[in-house]
Amino acid sequence: MYDAIKQQAGGDGCRRRALRVAGLALALGLAMQANAQSITGGLYGSAGEAGATVEVTREATGFAKTVIANRNGQYSLDQLSPGVYQVKVMRGGQAVSTQQVTVVASSAAAVPAAASESATDLGTVTVTAQNWNTVINPIDVSTPELSSIYTADLLSDLPVSQTSIYALARLDSATVMGNSFAQIGGASETENRYYFNEFDTSYDVTGAGAIVFPQVAVASTQLITGSGGLGWTSTTGGISSATLRQGTNEVHGGYSLYYTPATSSTLNPRGQDRFNPSGSPSLYQSDNSTGHIAQHYVWGSGPLVRDRLFAYVLYGRNPGYDSRSYTSNTRTDTQRDNKEGLINLTWNITDDQSLNVAAYRNEYSTNYYKSLAESGSVRYEPSKSTYGDPAWSGLETKQKLIIGNYKWRINDNLRVRLMAGTMRYDYAQATENSDVPFIGEYDYATDIDTTISPGDEWKPFEYYFEKKGFKGDVTWNIGDHEVVFGGEFYRNNYYYEPETNPAGYYYYYTNYPYAVGSFVPPGDVVYKYEYSIGGEFESKQKGVYLYDNWQVSPNVMLMLGGRWDQTQNMTSTGTKFLDMDLFSPRAGVSWDVHGDSSLKIGANVGRYTLPMPSTLSYLIASAETYKLNYYTYSGRNTDGTPTGLTPVASYVYSDGTLPEMSAVVSRNMKNTYQNEYQVYLQQQLTPTWSFLGQAAFHDLKRIVDQTCDTDGRLSDYVRANGHADYECLTGGGGCIEFNPGSSIELRDYLDADGSLKDITIPNSYLQMPKAKRRYIKLGAQLSHQRSDEAPYYLNLSYTWSHRYGNHDGYTNLTRSTDPKPGTSGNYDFLQNTFGSNGNLSGDRRHALVANGVYYFANGFRVGSVLNIASGIPQSCLGVYPDGSPEFDLLVQQGAVTHYCNGKLSPQGHGGKTDSTWRLDMSVGYDFAFGRDKGQQLSVDVSVTNLTNNDAITSRNMTSSSGLDASGNVVPSPTFRSVNGLQTPRSTNLYLRYGF
């Protein structure tokens, strides 16, 4: 895109400068705060002599700051808003060097030196601020942390989704794309963390995804695939951190259209069907269709008070689009609509203090019209079917985010950073029968079951998730040491309480016969069903970190530190039932081999944990009410509800009290953690070519999971060890959270005296294996940054990796039942662990990603992304093949073991999916017009999966469905059937106007 469109991120335009690549990034042994997880960046360089004056200015915001070079002639400045800065070095009152450098959020940029005898001479190249946007792996020797940074300008030129923060993960060969989210660093999809303007917006209900700002408002995104710094919320997965666009002194505005044509045979073809051996579809999508989608954005930016207060505003609207999908006997028409608004204010209080406040609101509505196929219709053949009147249902979602960031550079040696934010996500669903009671009737005399009133059985489905967070740290420079001390606190509130329809849930028993011992009298009665479970669940995450960036020598920086994390989860009544903390030591090194940032060797080692999502609280710490109230009645209203009710009996299964929480969590349970090791090399090969090689090893050492007393193994042990009257676990549905491989310290009502007592069930009895997940990665990356002499960007990334063990992590990638964190199902029965060790479901050995853009002089450009990946392992799951009575409950669970048609088949030994390749292409044209070429228009056509490949991405792994009367395994007719294919070709049109 042309520069004025790009100026919405910084507003400085593209100013050329010639430089020696020796000055691409001069590290020069400088103590400087790493800018990770920050909306600001920094710069550093050499003034050539001690005491030299360095003037740093930015015309677009009126920023001006003078710093003095230290005793080694080095200088640095951080907490800078992203954009282009002018750096002037003064010696003896004379300007000896004037350079321009582009500062990007979450990174420190090296300022080219006027001269450097020790610099590695790689030649001369002309670089512009525009070209710096194509440097995705800057050689930043001020930190041992390794990350990639993608600017919005670069992403807009590539054929990736322009509306999703998750899309850029496809540009890194070290990631494995799941159904919706990426698996990063060998972890599952629910172990990543997502940030916007330093605030952790991760969706801590399940851990999957985040509450996000619109991608069009993002200026740059940082991606870390492992070994993140101590300032991040600890995680065993990857980190994605986005920074929002800001205003400047220059007034800009524009309009963007993201358009997807309707389903067609060429531009957006339908998906393919796949069939079971019986001939019925295992994957049915050939009749599904979507109407055209048009997402509109209008934005503007500029000064409210010149040099001090700036604004960036955005309004987006999707006026609605339709889609239609089919199952064997239903047709669903869907209508969607959304609108959103954002404002980002930046107040430069002084040149040393700034305050940024961003606010965003989104409203999204969906209407569903579901029709059932009528008699005579043909299954899975819509063209031969007729459908009845549609039943309506709808949902509305709302999300709000407010984030504030304060920076204060107290003096050259002391800096403060504060962040506070809040967000909320509301979800509400209703149907046309939400206010209608559900009433049924069963006549014992005629054996006829009738629905009298077709109301909903449950109240409208609704929940909300709210997060509030605070963070602050202080950085103190003491000689060759930079000490950072900080902390963070997040409070999450998750409300979810399904309950029976408030309009009523009644069931008539007509001609009810009297049964001896029954608590309900004979005759005509009606019962009212009352059920609810859940409530509001609070969780807290606290973290404190301390580390020292120690400049051991002019070329070597050593980071030593640690982080303490605490996670607490509450029941629906506010009682704390989880309280786990962990100390994580970390160390890292950054070696600037030649002293000019042309070659960096880095390494990191440390321990990492992650919070426990709130969904576990709902699953095991909910107050449940379950009542059946029986009445005689004198009549019925016109809507079918009973009148003249007289209570005759009541049966209470659950009275709304919590389970005994001490019996739900083992008293010795500790939080999940893994150790991570990383070593890498970055080298500037030529003025425009750079290389990155890295190796990593991640070792999951402990996880929180669940085992159950379904087969009586736990209660058998208790009874055999001095508590003969013990019945079973009194909480958590007969299950308990523990650390697999460790003993269970149970506190429960072990005897009939009504008092809580303790007992330890050793793992020598349980025989549960420790959770194991090991991930090895070897990667290489070759990058070419755009220059005027070579006007193209290219990045080639290859990763070999191996993921093996017996646990996928917080998401069980093998089982299709979608178990939630802390309830994987791996340990419900001892037999589930047999054969569980092997190649894990995300074990993709080879992956190659090539992405690039070529910029023609006439304004045209061509972008492409090529993904090539080997297949991933499949397992063979089945029922436990022993039909003995002692295993009846296990057999009833279905295909939950690694027995493949009766024979043990280790994890990952059920074959592999196809190797896949996908080519995405885009063609764009940038056109400048108007006075001084001040208006720009960009038009892009982007096509994903250009060749419409349809390789198999997943198969049904259930080999057996049960045991027959003789105890023989019954093979599943759908085993190995295809249930996942590559997404079909998609074509999109992007139109952007800016001034």
Image: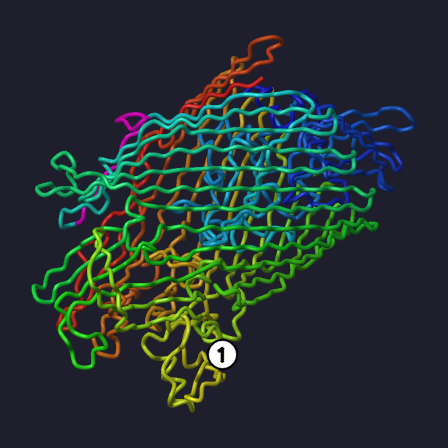
Secondary structure under the numbered disc 1 in the rendered image: strand
- Say which residue appears at 31% left-offset and 45% top-offset: 431
Q: Is residue 270 highlighted in magenta?
A: yes
Q: Is residue 187 visible?
A: no
Decide: is 508 above or below 685: below
Q: Is residue 213 left or right of residue 62?
A: left
Pick the quarter of the image with the C terminus: top right
Instruction: Please tell me in which quadrant of the rendered image residue 540 appears.
Output: bottom right
Q: Which of the pair 632/676 is nearer the observer?
A: 632
- Can residue 805 be seen at all in this image of the molecule? yes
Q: Is residue 149 above or below residue 744?
A: above
Asked where in the image residue 348 lies, by quadrant, the reply is top right
Taking the image as shown, residue 79 lies to the left or right of residue 706, namely: right
Foreground: 622 or 356?
Answer: 622
Disc 1 marks which residue?
745
Please tell me which residue is depicted at 64% across the width and 61% down the height of the picture.
Answer: 564
Which region is colored magenta? 262-276
Q: Nearer the viewer, residue 684 or 345?
A: 345
Q: Residue 746 appears at what percent x and percent y?
A: 47, 79
Residue at 56% x, 57% y is 676
